[in-house]
Image (cartoon, rainbow, N blue to C red):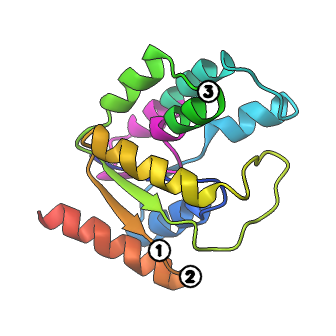
Amino acid sequence: MLKIYLTGPESSGKTWLAQSLAKHYDCPWVPEYARQYLQEKSGRYQYEDLENISKGQLDLENQFARNNPSKLILDTGQLVLYIWSMHKYGRVSIRIESSLKAQGGSLHLLCRPDIAWEEDSLRESPTERPLLFQKYKKALNNFNLPFAIVEGQGEKRTENAISCIEAFLSS
């Protein structure tokens, strides 16, 4: 099973792209557990909550993987939690870091924040998207995780992502 993790700063089109890719490849997509978790907590969280979110995301991923699809599109992964934790708290738990390292061999599509910011009560960093994008890129390189950068508007973004996936599959 090829797992394709969408990653990148807030409001960089991950959910929309996950849905588009799942439709194109006729495969399931795993939603972002953090959104559900944070809605239940009215958007308030602490460092310790990140481990709960990590576990919830992994449980959701495993639930979707049980049917053994050829491809699984993930709206997010452990890298988002890693970056979020480092950026906000200056540290990351061993559990999140270990879970991130276990994602090797999968493809990460890093979404460039070249689309308009969409306001959302759970989002925190509208002005820091370029800085965060660079942090994602650096972490992907540091952890030696296969990745490609996805950019463009609308269908061009989907086409770009499909090209990245096909190139990864043929390598």
Tell which tag, 1 or 3, sits nearer the viewer.
Answer: 1
Left or right relative to 9: residue 35:
right
Residue pointed to by mark 2: 153
**Magenta includes 73?**
yes
Mark 1, residues whose alpha carbon is within 10 Å: few (<14), some, or many (≥20)? many
In the rendering, at what x and y percent does residue 142 appear?
30, 39
Report the amino acid beneath label 3: Ile
Report the amino acid beneath label 2: Gln
Residue in the picture at 57% in, 66% down = 113
In the rendering, at what x and y percent does residue 153 appear?
56, 82
Residue pointed to by mark 3: 53
Q: Secondary structure at mark 2?
A: loop
Mark 2, residues whose alpha carbon is within 10 Å: few (<14), some, or many (≥20)? few
Q: Which residue range is magenta in the image? A: 60-80
Q: Secondary structure at mark 3?
A: helix
* Of residues 160 and 128, the one drawn nearer to the viewer in this rendering: 128
Residue pointed to by mark 1: 151
Q: Earlier in the sequence, mark 2 or mark 3?
A: 3
Residue in the picture at 57% in, 26% down = 90
Q: CA distance from mark 2 to mark 1?
A: 7 Å
Q: Is residue 32 above or below residue 157?
A: above
* Of residues 1 and 92, the one drawn nearer to the viewer in this rendering: 92
